[in-house]
């Protein structure tokens, strides 16, 4: 069974928590995988990852419990074919706008006659030809997540969700808010209202739906809406937030130290 589908079914009402991996670093990906996230997106859309690096990222995450999802740069069957041959089993497709595009995405992940994935007997996906009957069984293990990023896409949600082979939907709040005229305002009331509508319609269609937020507070709002799976930030975002927080804390201590000296008080003793 597909690992991401299994993760969603085993959630038991507790939305699986993931993150984005944007550093393009296998060592960082492996570290984040050991941090305890349930799933993570290896992002090819907004990072400099090439195919060999995707292989390295998948190899790194294989040593962790994190379920990998690869976001391809576009709904391109050639790129999807290469990503699947590299060993990806769940693909996140950005900017899907219609049922026809959803059908094209699903077809790219399936061998004929169900789809148009090019056949290769010798690939990392088949453990270099050692998986018995891989070419005739692989289709069942593929996972497809479609990203809806505009009001038009949300309007088409029912038709998109009805496409056979679509496992889950995903709302991209950054692009959705921008397309609604609220650039950078991911929790604007109008954006939140449309996201809530998308959640209700996805549930009515029987499709899991997820999203991503930059902070625990934002993710808590998304969970309250009813999203089935959520992600918080990215490896780089979490790194930058922790780094800036540590610097701010130290600089605040420096200011307090200077103030204590100028006030004629003795600073408190302490070690490292």
Image (cartoon, rainbow, N blue to C red):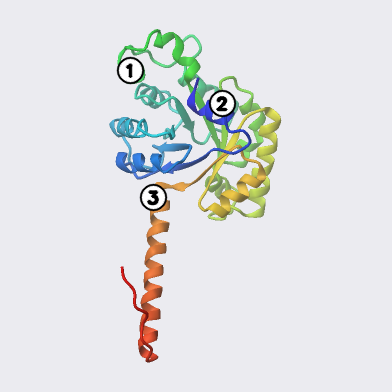
Residue at numbered disc 2: 167
Q: Is 178 on the left or on the right of 117, as rendered?
A: right
Residue furthest bottom in the image: 264
Residue 80 lies, in percent from the top left, at 41, 25
Q: Of residues 257 and 3, which is closer to you in this image? A: 257
CA gap between label 2 and label 3 equals: 28 Å
Q: Going 65% across and 27% down the picture, which residue do you hit?
A: 159
Snapshot quadrant of residue 74: top left
Q: Going 49% across and 35% down the picture, which residue do you hit?
A: 94
Q: Of residues 125 and 91, which is closer to you in this image? A: 125
Foreground tag (1 vs 2): 1
Point out the tag, 1 or 2, that comes first from the N-terminus. Answer: 1
Looking at the rendered structure, which numbered label has been put on residue 97?
Answer: none
Q: Are marks 3 and 1 in contact (CB under 8 Å)?
A: no
Q: Are marks 1 and 2 in contact (CB under 8 Å)?
A: no
Q: Residues within 10 Å of mark 2 (few under 14, many from 20)?
A: many
Snapshot quadrant of residue 78: top left
Point out the tag, 2 or 3, that comes first from the N-terminus. Answer: 2
Residue 128 lies, in percent from the top left, at 30, 16
CA gap between label 3 and label 1 equals: 31 Å
In this rendering, the answer to whether 272 lies above or below 195 is below
Residue furthest left in the image: 52
In this rendering, the answer to whether 88 lies above or below 195 is above
Snapshot quadrant of residue 96: top right
Residue at numbered disc 3: 236
Res 111 visible: no
Q: Secondary structure at mark 3?
A: helix
Residue 65 lies, in percent from the top left, at 42, 33
Q: Of residues 29 and 166, which is closer to you in this image? A: 29
Residue at numbered disc 1: 127
Residue 181 lies, in percent from the top left, at 59, 52
CA gap between label 1 and label 2 equals: 24 Å
């Amino acid at each position: 069974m597909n690992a991401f589908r299994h993760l969603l079914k085993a959630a038991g009402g507790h939305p699986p928590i993931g993150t984005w991996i944007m550093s393009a670093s296998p060592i960082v990906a492996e570290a984040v995988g050991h941090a305890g996230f349930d799933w993570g997106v290896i992002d090819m859309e907004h990072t400099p990852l090439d195919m060999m690096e995707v292989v390295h990222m998948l190899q790194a995450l294989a040593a962790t419990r994190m379920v990998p999802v690869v976001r391809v740069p576009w709904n391109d069957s050639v790129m999807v074919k290469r990503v699947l041959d590299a060993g990806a089993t769940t693909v996140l497709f950005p900017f899907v706008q219609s049922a026809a595009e959803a059908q094209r995405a699903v077809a790219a992940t399936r061998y004929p006659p169900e789809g148009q994935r090019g056949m290769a007997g010798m690939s990392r996906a088949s453990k270099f030809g050692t998986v018995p009957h891989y070419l005739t069984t692989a289709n069942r293990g593929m996972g497809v997540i479609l990203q809806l990023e505009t009001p038009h896409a949300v309007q088409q949600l029912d038709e998109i969700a009805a496409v056979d082979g679509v496992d889950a939907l995903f709302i991209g709040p950054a692009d959705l808010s921008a397309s609604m005229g609220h650039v950078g305002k991911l929790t604007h009331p109008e954006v939140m209202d449309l996201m809530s509508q998308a959640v209700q319609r996805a549930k009515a269609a029987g499709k899991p739906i997820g999203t991503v937020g930059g902070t625990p507070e934002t993710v808590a709002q998304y969970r309250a809406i009813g999203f089935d799976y959520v992600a918080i930030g990215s490896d780089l975002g979490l790194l930058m937030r922790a780094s800036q927080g540590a610097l701010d804390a130290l600089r605040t201590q420096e200011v307090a130290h200077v103030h204590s000296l100028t006030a004629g008080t003795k600073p408190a003793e302490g070690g490292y």
